[in-house]
Every structure is written in C-alpha cells, then in structure tokens.
Image (cartoon, rainbow, N blue to C red):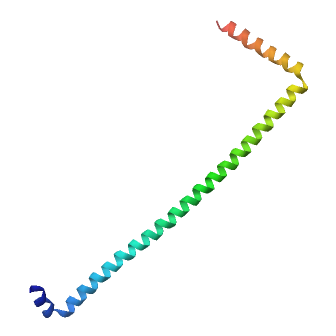
Amino acid sequence: MENQRIKSQFPKTTDDVEKLKQTASDAASDVGDVTTEHASRASKQIKQLAGDAKEEGRQQLEQVKGRLEDVATAARDYFHARPALCLVFAFALGAFFARRSCSDE
C-alpha cells in the first residue's frame, strides 16, 4: 500500500528510479560480458605463447643434440685416425693425476 501511495504521489521520480535500476543492471551485465570476453582472449594468447615457447625449446634442443652428435663424431673420428697418440695421451693424463694424488698425501 505504501508503495502504491508513493508511486502515485511521485510518478516521475518512480520512473526515474526504475530507469536507474535498469541502467545499473545493464551496466553490470555489460561488465560481465566484457570481462568474459577479455578473459577468453587472454586465455587464447597464453595458450599460443606456451605453444610458441614449447616449439622454440624443441628446436633449440634439436640444435644442441645435433651439435653434440657432431662433437662425438669428430672425437670418434680423431681417435680412430690416431689410436697410438690417444693411448699416449691417456697414459700421460693418468700418470699426471696419479702423481698429483700421491703428492697431496
């Protein structure tokens, strides 16, 4: 009853209040929609960045593996081409470390 009496005494104010409520409701809905849209875009960008980083990491790992294979191949080729020199070097290196460990005691 009280609401009816107020509405009848202040019809313009009542309409303005109703419009204000609707505007506030619409604004809240718009904010929610915009937030959802931005979150969706951000999620897609993060997934894209993660995929790019993964691919770049994979490529760099492949490059490192290739270089290590090249070094191993070069070392194997060197040892096969000069086995006597490698044995002399290994013996000298062993003697050096043996002598050094004996002098530390």
Q: Quadrant of the C terminus?
A: top right
Q: Residue placed at 76% from the left, 42% from the top?
A: 66
Q: Is residue 88 above or below residue 43?
A: above
Q: Quadrant of the N terminus?
A: bottom left
Residue 62, percent from left and from top:
72, 45
- Name the side, left or right, on which 74 lies relative to 52: right
Q: Is residue 105 above or below residue 39?
A: above
Give the image quarter of residue 65.
Answer: top right
Q: Residue placed at 47% from the left, 70% from the top?
A: 37
- Name the side, left or right, on which 50 lies relative to 8: right
- Name the side, left or right, on which 8 lies relative to 73: left
Q: Residue furthest left?
A: 1
Q: Residue placed at 55% from the left, 59% from the top?
A: 47
Q: Residue placed at 62% from the left, 56% from the top?
A: 52
Q: Is residue 7 above or below residue 52?
A: below
Q: Is residue 39 above or below residue 62?
A: below
Residue 67, percent from left and from top:
77, 40
Residue 22, percent from left and from top:
30, 83
Give the image quarter of residue 103.
Answer: top right
- Name the side, left or right, on which 79 lies relative to 46: right
Number of numbered discs on residues: 0
